[in-house]
Amino acid sequence: MNNTEIMKNVLERASVLLAWGPGHDALHASPLFARKAHDVDKVVMDVRAVQSLAAYLPPLFQSEKEGRIAVLARPCHVRSITALLQEELIPVERLILVVLPCQGKLDMAKVMAACPAAESLDAAFVDGDNLVINADGRQWLLRLETMLSPACVRCPMPELPDAMIPEGCECVRLDGQARRPGEGGYAALDAFMEKTPQERWEFWKQEMSRCIRCYACRNACPMCVCRDHCVASARDPHWLSELDSVTDKLLFQVIHATHLAGRCTGCGECTRACPMGIPVGLLKMQMNKIVEELFGYKAGMDSKATPPLLTFEAIEKNIREKGK
Amino acid sequence: MPILERRIIGFLCNWCSYGGADAAGVSRFTQPTDLRVVRLPCTGRMNPIFVVKALLAGADGVLVSGCHPKDCHYSEGNYYARRRLEVIKRFLPVLGIEPLRFEYTWVSAAEAKRWQEVVTAFTEQIHALPPVPRLPDDTGIERLLRELENSPLPICGCHAGHE
Ligand code: SF4
Ligand code: SF4
């Protein structure tokens, strides 16, 4: 069976297959909810399929109309889904994971910078190691490796290990070649932390003054499951005013990062979704690093693990508090 | 130069540190006067965002104090708090905020003397730092209006020449 046949076969057992399909132009793919076999023919799953579909799962599972739900997932998306399973936000028995060996995903900001003409392109496709863009009567050949999102370049797990398949979850693998693994780690954060504290403060002051408070960073996050009950829009308690002041916007980012402590899988969706190009993922990366140092824990690796901020030890190995 | 007061917010557990602070007052122990106290039912009520909200709103320091581990009135509130507060303390540097602006500690109701030491040491620690940096409080609309006021061009054609 080729991949299209595999997906059609899965769809026979599910009411919907969450996938990617054609977007507003040849360079972009959009989320596609495939319900009929012929929808599967439209699926796009190369480097252009940049969104994580995990954020659609919790609300979709609430719908009584849905039967089983199948979802196309890169290995990093599987971590988000595992994290949702850890908190029992989605039911494992109604889920079908369709995992693709990952070739990485494009960083659209990099593509646009390398080829501004891509705003109005005629064609875009992947040819071997290159992304080919036809626009303005010219052709651009962009080396894929230089156009991928930084998270993909460093991704340690482009092929999902069997041990990472959540317990009790039906998982179907698609055929294909994964890219070579990167070394993981927190390189972008470490580079940022080399700045002085004053520079860091000024950096966020600058970046947050550009924030338009659209909350795309929150809405794209697979782990932001509160939806209409987000504290950011609550009047009581009134954590944030309705002003677009830098203080409110920075405080919102701190709220997102704290609410993701021990839950963020580092999928990078928040940074990707920001229309202003603000690297808000750095704040969560710091949170993830702290959680790893303190509790030796990474979210979304084990569907049976308890997130560390939901539990405690009477004697904490790595915390030296004052006054003991 | 006279040492001005700094703004320090203390979040104290009702069952222990609040009592300890009260006992220190009743015993007439000399204490610095910079601290403003918010009483909590338990440090488990302490949302880490209280810390950042206070610092961004202009507090120079935040001190949280609760019951010693094993002595929580609700048996486990301070254990959860310890994890959350340690995480937020380590988070402050990425924002460029000095982590010494925040401490959490344990003081029981019987430890009036220890309360005096804790609050004195923390106040000194905050006085050794410059005042907390502030973000501009004006909003985008205020900035825009200011720019328009200073702009040499009329705002729109309709009102040009009608002054
Ligand atoms: S906070 Fe950002 S990186 Fe973390 S899970 Fe949410 S979208 Fe992904
Ligand atoms: S996506 Fe970007 S602009 Fe929108 S609220 Fe988040 S940080 Fe601000």
Image (cartoon, grey):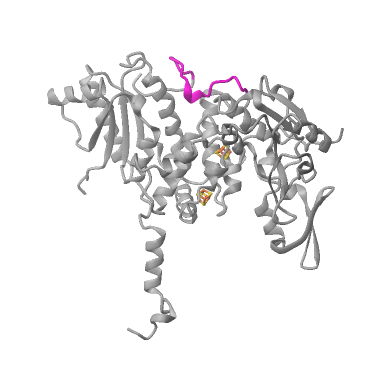
Q: Is residue A173 magenta?
A: no
**Residue A128 placement, left or right of A66:** right
Instruction: Classify the position of the C terminus of chain A by image quarter.
Output: top left
Q: Is residue A280 visible?
A: no
| Residue at the spot 76% in from the left edge and 31% down from the top edge | A12
Q: Which quarter of the figure has residue B119?
A: top left
Q: What stretch is highlighted in magenta?
A: A302-317
Q: Does the magenta stretch include residue A314?
A: yes
Pick the front one: A64 or A134: A64
- What x and y, as percent, mark residue B113? 21, 21
> Main SS of the magenta segment?
loop
| Residue at the spot 51% in from the left edge and 23% down from the top edge | A308
- What x and y, as percent, mark residue B146? 37, 68
Q: Which quarter of the figure has residue A120?
A: bottom right
Number of callouts in the render? 0
**Residue B25 placement, left or right of A164:** left
Which of the four quarters of the rendered structure image does ligand 1 lie in?
Answer: top right
Taking B96 as reference, is B20 above or below it? above
- What x and y, as percent, mark residue A27? 73, 54
| Residue at the spot 71% in from the left edge and 24% down from the top edge | A170
**Residue B70 placement, left or right of A154:** left
| Residue at the spot 38% in from the left edge and 32% down from the top edge | B47
Pick the front one: B101 or B81: B81
